[in-house]
Amino acid sequence: MKVAPHLKRRLVHSAFLLSAISAFTFGIAQLAPGTFLDDIRLNPQVSSRTIDLLRVEYGLDQPLPIRYVRWLSSVGKGEFGYSLAYNVPVSKLLWTRTQNTVLLGATAMLLGWMIALPLGIWTAFRPRSWIDRGSSVGSTLLLATPELALGMLFLLAATRWGILPAGGMMSIHSEQNRWLAITDVVRHLVLPAAVLALVAVPVLLRHVRAATVEALNSPFIQAAMGHGIGNGRLLLRHALPAAANPLISLFGLSLAGLVSGSFLVEIITGWPGLGPLFINAVFARDLHIVMAVVMLFSVVLVLASLASDLLLYAIDPRVRAEC
Amino acid sequence: MGGVSLLPACSPTRAMLEVRDLAVSYRDRDRTRVVFDALNFEIRTGEVLGMQGRSGCGKTSAALALLKLLPASAKVGGEVLFRGKDLLKLPQSQLRTVRGREISIIYQEPSLALNPVLRVGDQISEILRAHTALTSCERGERVRQILNDVQLGSERYYQAYPHELSGGECHRIVLAQALVCRPALVIADEPTAGLDHELKHEILDLIDRLQRDTGAALLLISHDRSVTSRLAVRTIDLSGVEERRLPAVSKPRTSIPKDQSFGSCEDSLVTVRKLIKTYKPQGMFRSNQAEKQVLRSVDLTIAKGSLTALVGPSGSGKSTFARCLALLETADSGEILFEGKNLLALRGEDLRSFRARLQYVFQDAAAALNPRLSAAEIIAEPLTIQNSGTREERVRRAEGLMEQTGLDPSAAHRSCHEFSGGQKQRLVIARALTLEPSLLIFDESLSGLDPETRDEILDVLVSLRHQMGITQLLISHDLELVSRVADNIVVMGNGRIVSQLNKKLETHSRASTGTEQLLDAKAQNPFVLSESN
């Protein structure tokens, strides 16, 4: 089997999967009681006639399949539906929000791997050293701390000492100068990114350590030691490539988390990403935004797993031989 | 456990390596298990010293102890003097300059000793990089030269990954690794284990030639007397060190009386008709390769309760046939009738329940055991999967099976990597017996064992058939060996059955073509024996 046909088949599969997810999500969302207009109906200044007119205008009186097909056609036009709350096509809202979320997610992911990879390798190489014990205790503590509590703790520290801005993405007057604007965003980024990275590190660390320990215990590493290969070389050139397989799959998962992992943190730190948009849309029953965000997550997940498979194919000769 | 008696004394001034009172023991929970407590020997420059002994007597431990390569759970005492320096007292940094450069080691299982994700050429080059100041070009040059020396001259081998090489080629690669820095001493730990007769001699010839060319001293470790006696001038024997447990099976040794009736021997358990298997070319860059037909219409009947041996040279399709029979691979066409049911048509639940009735004992026992499990867990795992019995019952059953296969039940809690090669093979057999299968397939399970262990395991097989009536299919390249126990011998060559001999019925059929070529193909031909049986 060659790569190109394999890729083609995977993409066809993915297309089927995504359309199934979209139909399923659309149906489920409709099962939930209430529509966008229910909140307006509570307002005594709006007459029921106006509400009926709005119902017709938004197409909410149409049966489910027709609404689904309409949504699909708007996806085809690149609008991804129409937000009733914001009164704009969803694509306009989605784009900047996605950029903000990816900026936060990528920074956190980078930070998480930069901590977990060297620490995991080192603790695998020197088990039961004080670094290993310390990192084990630390990661257990972090694993047991809820994301929410960690975020609150950081916010508390930020307001108490005033080193970092507590929430948001930009200060009000930061746009006068480009350089100032960038440093301002970075300063705002530190807190949520640190929380996210600290949440991810324990899981990554454990996987990296376990994979490296397994590689180091394998007979071929013992053999390389017998050939007098030095420690650094042994670790980086011999053990790490052999330990890479599970880590690449994990990397694929963390790629998928790039857009979906930072929800809660975005909400509590007021980061204008997809998280607050999604939650508000759910409460407002602004269906098309919910649909668009869910589909975005699915697409990223599918692409991330494809990317990790391709990476695996590129790195491991045994996978290449099986394909 | 006493010290190992020594060889003829030789002048201490000329000895390159002197081992004095070497002791190795393992901490095993609370107790200490002594492997040997006073091993003494010496090796002179350019000398070949053989080291032999049964499996489990500590040969490999001795080899690894010389270079301080034993795991942390091992305690090593005594002195290893190499050119006057005690290797056991050297700090790691200095020891590293000795390993691979002055003393190199050839590991027992080459396919496991090679890194699966690095090209073999680079793996040899890495050793040069660790010990010399050569540039990468010079290293490449030197690697190609050493590959040429081990008769793997083509550029394909430099670029190959270990999984693309055959067993014999992997042996040559680890040989090249050991010799590339021109060490003063090479330790070869079972360099021919698991190889068939022909390959074994090729590798020994190669070791012999290279040893003469380079003038390196050689410590040759093998359970096989014919190997050590062929190259070594002197030989030490470690067998005296540990008392060996004999299997609890009280059956006469190996040979079976011919007049014995095997119950319903005439009923067939398995009937194979016109089985064909073709390997298609795989991978990105191999599309221009031709298809390889491995099985060309194989017909075979295995009688219930019989012990059938399937013999033939490497590449004759024996293993593929067995794997197809066990449904580990899917045959292209043909029929496999197991008690009248066509296996190739089984699906789902039927297929799952069939799998318990047939057990496959793999060639490489070490690779078929999960190193994280204890012996009892390994043997009881099929029961755990089937969720049968309580934990205590399962452990008791595991201990019973260990007893039955000649293992010490008190070792049930030990992790399986602490067992020797022969013991691992018994573990695998014990595990295969757990579900009381009706057919057992042994795929070269006897190769790589020393003669005594092999005989004991053959005893186990014979007793299994007598006591439990288990039908067995024994795949081997060693016809002399299987002819002692098998009542039906099937010879395969080139994907076909070329000859069949039924001991009980004294019938002998032979397809006219192919057999003679097969017989001529080997200098020392084991198949001749089949004619005289």
Image (tube, grey):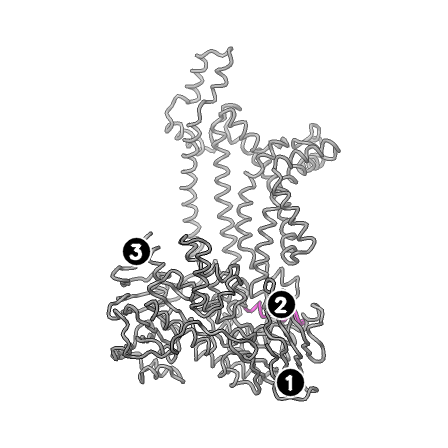
Separation of marks 3 and 1 at Cα, in angstroms = 63 Å
Taking the image as drawn, is residue B299 in sight? no
> Residue B130 in magenta?
yes
Quick check: marks 3 and 1 in contact, CB under 8 Å?
A: no
Of the numbered discs 3 and 1, the one sitting upstream in the chain is 1
In the rendered structure, which amino acid carries the disc numbered 1? Arg
Whether residue A56 appears in this view of the structure is yes
Identify the chain of the residue marked 2, using the numbered disc in the image.
B
| Viewer-closest of A72 and B277 | B277
Q: Residue at x 37, y 72 (%)?
A: B463
Task: Give percent across and percent down for residue B405.
Answer: 43, 69
Which-is-in-front pick, marks 2 and 1? Answer: 2
Q: Return the residue at label 1.
A: B44
Mark 2 or 1 closer to N-term?
A: 1
Say yes or no: labels 2 and 1 on the same chain: yes
Q: Nearer the viewer, residue B290 or B378?
A: B378
Residue B396 to residue A12: above or below: below
- Say the numbered circle drawn on residue B74: 2
Majority SS type along the magenta span:
helix
Q: Amino acid at mark 2?
A: Ala
Q: Label 1 lies in what chain?
A: B
> Which residue does the numbered mark 3 point to in the structure image?
B346
A228 relative to A245, above or below: below
* Residue displayed at 58% across by 85% down: B212
Q: Amino acid at mark 3?
A: Leu
